[in-house]
Amino acid sequence: MTGYDVVCRTLETLGVGCVFGLPGSQNIPFFEALRRSNLRTVVPTSELSAAFMAIGFARASGKAGVLTTIPGPGFTYAVTGLAEARLDSVPLLHIVQRPASGPGSRFNLQSLDQQAIAASLVKGVFRPEVAGELSTTIRTAYDLAVHGEPGPVMVELAATMLEGETPEPANADVIEGGGPPLSPPRELRSAIALLRNARRPILLAGQGSASDEDWLRALAERLPSPVLTSTSGRGVLAEDHFLAVPSDLCQLDDVNALIAECDLVLALGIKFSHNGSRGFGLRIPPERLIHVDASQEVLGANYPGHLLIHGDVPHFISQVLDALEEQGSTASTWTPDEVAAWRRRVAVGRSGGVEPSVAGADPSTPAKFFALVGEALPRAACLVTDSGWHQMLVRRYFQVLAFRSLIVPTNLQSMGFGLPAAIGAKLAAPERPVVVVLGDGGFLMCGMELVTAVRHNLSLPIIVFNDGSYGLIRIQQLRDYGRTHGVDCSGLDLESVALASGARYVRVDRDIRAPLRAAVAASGPTLIEVMVGDSSGIHRLRAAGIVRRTAPRGLWQGVARWLRRLRAARRD
């Protein structure tokens, strides 16, 4: 077998299932080996989409997504995907060939220092020098991608090493799983004592707290304790659970008021990034914080704590549960009624103020629309979004009832992410309904992946919010200036695009539920157009922007005070 066959055989034994990428002159032999393998090869329209597909696959499965590119433009097209995976802690294995080189020659074709470019975006770069190292290198790179804090890893391969005959990899090439250390016994005992004696504990959970055994839910119920999550951690506890306090994009003052009621904050698998900390606005007294994470780097980085524990988070939770079971009752005084009152208080602050009107619901509000979407989907359904206003509306109003059921580009916020990531998620979990919601601007960036979804006959509802503009930027311009510029993306005929691609098309004017259920059950993708328009709030925002731009400063301040009083009166 060739070195390419060794790479494919190793990926098969790792159970990755799919490889995303495009063939080029430099990797034709690799695609021949992929053809002979049991791996599913998915060829999108660009390496950027391939990277986003690999991310969607990883986030829906927990396995590393595998991406392959040629050097040069293939590699650089994928760089945004590497950055997205790095900031969102997504395991990704990027297999790329080295640029051509020759002794005594400079300015070779597509000659880039790929290792230097990728260095700050990946957890590691591997460059095996002999064919005998291939299998071990691939396994080691995969292990690095999935363990500890997950992230992207790059393997750069030389064509000369891959094309010759290579011995089949031996069983000894298997790499044992690594990861963070187990929690030190002394720190574990301290954490258990603090949790057992806390009268008002609260859990802050990120995606690193999830486990197949559902230990987080067991810990919350055992204490008991209310649970807040980061955006990427949503669903680690079902949001209809009586201890869950859904708070994504809610009023920060309400969240901080809840934290202020607590005498102990246990942060699990959350790195307190910008989004994970509500723009670094969470107020957590250091003397009350226990932070447990798989990454040493995040501990104390933004939030100093009383007890910082570098360790495997699910194992930590299981050890705490065992100890609490042995030691009997805890001091927590939380009651279901108290947690329910906080759920209601935080939910009141969920409304984002100015929001568009959305077809497909009556009344035509985003809150009603996504309530109907939730009614139409089973608990295990996965919702994927792009970056934009629609994502903010999803995060406010869609109830996440299972882990890996909400996939958004959290910390880089790449437009064009949604559709390819949803394709990757559907390939990873074909038994689960996967739905993608994106704006018309995002569709313009990735819409040709509709062809890929048709080619692979994926049952994939694609909901496109169509307002003919880059809606979030337009709203910001109206707020600040009362006018817009550079945000027009009208003219998109989605019905014709669906027809040309071979996808089904539906325009929803009334109730989204029946069309969405039909799209979930259909063979192949369905493009669902939802018209989005200006609400009365947007009209008021535009008027206020015009006043701000044209009126004397004193007059504008008076109008602003009047608008604030009007909003306050309506809330009362």
Image (cartoon, helix red, strand yellow):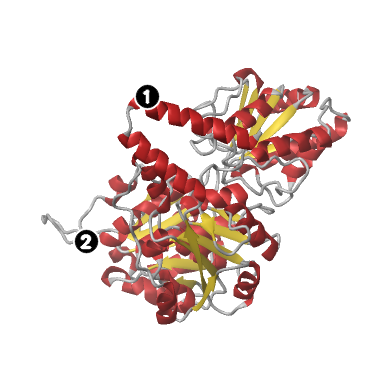
Residue marked by disc 1? 554
- Asked if one can make out residue 144 in the rendered structure from this viewpoint, the answer is no
Above or below for 196 versus 210? above
- Residue at 37% x, 64% y: name it: 444
Helix, strand or loop at mark 2: loop
Q: Residues within 10 Å of mark 2 (few under 14, many from 20)?
A: some
Above or below for 317 versus 364? above
Residue type of the residue flagged with mark 2: Ala
- Residue at 34% x, 68% y: name it: 491
Q: Quadrant of residue 468?
A: bottom left
- Asked if one can make out residue 210 in the rendered structure from this viewpoint, the answer is yes
Residue type of the residue flagged with mark 1: Gly
Q: Nearer the viewer, residue 560 or 13?
A: 560
- Residue at 37% x, 71% y: name it: 30
Residue marked by disc 2? 100
Question: Of label 1 and label 2, which has the lower sequence position?
Answer: 2
The picture places residue 474, in percent across and down from the top left corner, at 38, 49
Name the residue at the right extreme.
Answer: 328
Q: Residues within 10 Å of mark 1 (few under 14, many from 20)?
A: few
The picture places residue 423, in percent across and down from the top left corner, at 50, 67
